[in-house]
Image: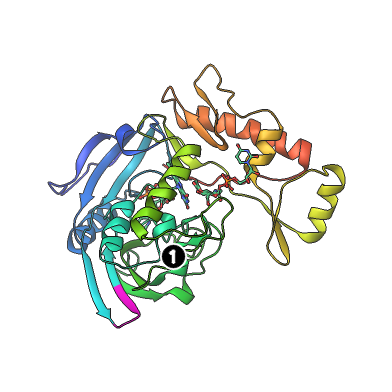
């Protein structure tokens, strides 16, 4: 390995990341830094380039599977701030720093009577990661409320703003996750929120009427934590697989074999709950000797109770994928991203 030169003081060596990922995978970063502003971010990239090091972006680690050893520089984004840019009688435009905690931001906004994100409350993670996989829950996706995203592109060393319509938001995907902006660092996210509280209540099980956004958020918290394990108690990364989307034609063929299959109509396509497929195959609540398995209240969540390494989790995931493929002829795609 070449000698490392000009290492800035804010870059640390051999940093333990087990407490920085909700799956609690044991992981050590060769180099690690916490970034508070764009100037520091530029310095970090400049230094990584000078030393030929790979770079990896880390938010709050709630949608990641970390390698045991991560070569290169892990850049943890902690850029803060919440600014109200414009308001009229109906809407407000708000810009939030990428390093702000997502749920705390939703609560702050709701307290200011800025509405629209309530159904996404309690989703772990940072504001900056929210556009990456276009976080969604209970009938709302963050892309519905985002006006624009500001990012730093390490290839050109520039800061740019991209409008919502160019972010290619779709189910658990965006230009930042699988498109041409995978290498950029999100600095701020700008939302267009409503001054009127008018919750989206179309998701099955949500009440038709609730008086205040505070009560609504409490309700969302109750249904969320009745199904999902809190990573503080049980290490997990939320849904481990995406819900597969198949064409109507494909669905007809699957239904011929599995008449009781649960599905959601999307117009031309059909969404099949991966939790149902996994549940049918008897995986729910089955935890193996490594402490890895499908959560007892939600089959789609893989738990890592003994804080094992990513490889062991992926072994279990492959076993589930194979079983679903064999039985239903459906391919399950892993939702969390691999880092390192
Ligand atoms: P990380 O896990 O740190 O990173 C995720 C990805 O985003 C990585 O590729 C990383 O490189 C990239 N990234 C992070 N920050 C930036 C940045 N500033 N710029 C560029 N790239 C960046 N997700 C849902 O959509 N809906 C849910 O209902 C939901 N429920 C969950 C429940 C639980 C219990 C858990 C543990 C997870 C859940 N998730 C859910 C997944 C997760 O909370 C979200 O994906 C969240 O947005 C991840 O944020 P993070 O800061 O932890 O990102
Ligand atoms: N189901 C089962 N067994 C289970 C759980 C669910 O059969 O153990 C079936 C039921 O038929 C149920 C259906 O699956 O109606 C859907 O279940 P649920 O409403 O719990 O939602 P999900 O499709 O499993 C998705 C998201 C979650 C999000 C919730 C609420 C994905 C991959 N997951 O889960 O997001 O919070 O809806 O909107 O789209 C995440 O992405 O990490 C995540 C947690």
Considering every residue shown, the one lying at the far bottom of the view is: 88
Q: Residue 233 at what x, y percent from top left?
A: 37, 29
Quadrant that contains the C terminus: top left
Q: Nearer the viewer, residue 161 or 29?
A: 161
Q: Nearer the viewer, residue 139 or 287?
A: 139
Q: Going 30% across and 56% down the picture, which residue do you hit? A: 107
**Magenta stretch contains residue 242:** no
Q: Going 33% across and 32% down the picture, which residue do you hit? A: 18
**Exactly how many numbered labels are in the figure?**
1
Task: Determine whether 302 is above or below 212 in the image.
Answer: above
Residue at the disc numbered 1: 181
Quadrant that contains the N terminus: top left
Name the side, left or right, on which 133 lies relative to 106.
right
Asked which colour scheme the image uses, the reply is rainbow
Task: Determine the secondary structure under disc 1.
Answer: loop
Q: Residue 61 at what x, y percent from top left?
A: 36, 43
Q: Nearer the viewer, residue 201 or 46?
A: 201
Q: Based on the displayed image, in which of its 4 quarters is residue 307 positioned?
A: top left
- Is residue 121 at least partly visible in the picture? no
Name the side, left or right, on which 180 lies relative to 60.
right
Task: Determine whether 324 is above or below 217 in the image.
Answer: above
Task: Determine whether 176 is above or below 307 in the image.
Answer: below
Q: Going 49% across and 63% down the picture, which residue do you hit? A: 200
Segment colored magenta: 88-93
Considering every residue shown, the one lying at the far right of the view is: 256
**Ligand 1 closer than 8 Å to label 1 CB:** no
Considering every residue shown, the one lying at the far top of the view is: 289
- Are there few (<14), some (14-19), or many (20+) residues within 10 Å of tag 1? some
Q: Residue 241 at what x, y percent from top left?
A: 58, 44
Q: Residue 290 at what x, y percent from top left?
A: 50, 19
């Amino acid at each position: 390995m070449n000698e490392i030169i000009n290492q800035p003081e804010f870059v640390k060596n051999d940093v333990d990341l087990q407490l920085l990922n909700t799956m609690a995978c044991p992981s050590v970063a060769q180099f690690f830094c916490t970034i508070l502003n764009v100037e520091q971010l530029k310095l970090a990239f400049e230094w990584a380039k000078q030393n030929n090091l790979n770079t990896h972006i880390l938010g709050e680690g709630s949608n990641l599977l970390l390698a045991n050893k991560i070569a290169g520089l892990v850049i943890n984004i902690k850029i803060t701030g919440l600014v109200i840019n414009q308001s009229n009688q109906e809407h407000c435009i708000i810009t939030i720093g990428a390093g702000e905690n997502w749920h705390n931001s939703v609560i702050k906004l709701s307290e200011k009577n800025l509405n629209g994100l309530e159904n996404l409350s309690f989703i772990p993670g940072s504001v900056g990661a929210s556009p990456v996989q276009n976080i969604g829950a209970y009938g709302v996706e963050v892309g519905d409320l985002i006006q624009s995203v500001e990012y730093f592109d390490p290839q050109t060393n520039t800061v740019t703003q991209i409008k919502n319509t160019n972010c290619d938001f779709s189910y658990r995907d965006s230009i930042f996750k699988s498109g041409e902006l995978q290498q950029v660092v999100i600095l701020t996210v700008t939302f267009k929120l409503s001054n009127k509280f008018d919750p989206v209540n179309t998701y099955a099980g949500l009440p038709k009427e609730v008086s205040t956004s505070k009560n609504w958020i409490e309700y969302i918290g109750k249904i969320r934590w009745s199904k999902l394990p809190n990573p503080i108690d049980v290490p997990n990364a939320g849904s481990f697989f995406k819900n597969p989307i198949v064409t109507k034609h494909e669905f007809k063929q699957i239904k011929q074999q599995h008449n009781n299959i649960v599905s959601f109509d999307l117009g031309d396509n059909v969404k099949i709950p991966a939790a149902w497929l996994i549940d049918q195959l008897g995986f729910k609540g089955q935890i193996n000797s490594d402490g890895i398995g499908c959560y007892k209240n939600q089959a789609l969540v893989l738990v890592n109770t003994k804080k094992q390494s990513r490889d062991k989790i992926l072994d279990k995931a492959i076993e589930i994928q194979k079983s679903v493929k064999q039985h239903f002829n459906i391919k399950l795609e892993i939702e969390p991203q691999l880092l390192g």
